[in-house]
Amino acid sequence: MEELKRHQSILISSIRRIAWVFDAFIIFTLSVVGLFLIVWIVYEFYLVLSGQLPLERGGLSILGSVLILYAISELLSEEIKHIRGGAVSIRAFVGVALAAIIRKVLIISLSPEKVQELITLALVLVALGLVFWLIHKVESSS
């Protein structure tokens, strides 16, 4: 019996070390991607200001990149909370999905022939917004 408990303890501590390596890799990767994205946003500003990218497309592109940066920031924040022992919040993932759908709506809004796809995304956006609100309401009440 003692032998079994010792093996279980070794197995659990090994799995915890492996999970920590995964968490550290996720934090490192999200941080590097976030830094690259900041450089990309600055480059997009340069393209707009120099006139190489039209203001309408450039503004939407910058906004889309900022939404991606927001998503990375949310995921990074949640991963840090997770490493500190907190529970992972589903609200962060729904927020990331909302940001992604909003970005897609912004891109599709430039093409007037994609009305059907825009309506579909609007319905998805409303559904995700409702889920986000419900999760927020449940989390804040507990």
Image: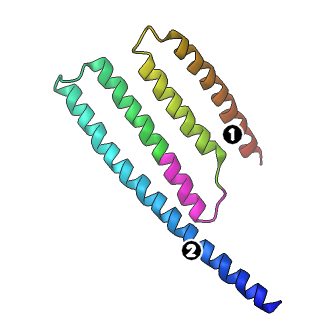
Q: Label 1 amino acid? A: His
Q: Position of residue 101 (x, y in %)?
A: 53, 28
On screen, 48 above or below 2? Answer: above
Q: Position of residue 65 (x, y in %)?
A: 38, 35
Q: Position of residue 74 (x, y in %)?
A: 52, 46
Does residue 4 appear left or right of residue 48 in this picture? right
**Which type of secondary structure does the marked residue at label 1 adopt?**
helix
Does residue 17 appear left or right of residue 61 in this picture? right
For label 2, the residue is: 17
Front disc: 1 or 2: 2
Question: Which scheme is used to colour this image of the protein?
Answer: rainbow
For label 1, the residue is: 136
Q: Label 2 amino acid? A: Arg
Please report contact status of discs 1 and 2: CB closer than 8 Å, yes or no.
Answer: no
Type of secondary structure dominating the magenta stretch? helix
Q: Earlier in the sequence, mark 1 or mark 2?
A: 2
On screen, 44 above or below 139? Answer: above
Residue located 63% across and 19% down the image: 123
Does residue 120 appear left or right of residue 52 in this picture? right
Region rendered in magenta: 73-87
Residue located 61% across and 72% down the image: 16
Q: Position of residue 97 (x, y in %)?
A: 56, 36
Quadrant position of residue 87: bottom right
Q: Nearer the viewer, residue 55 or 15?
A: 15
On screen, 14 above or below 139? Answer: below
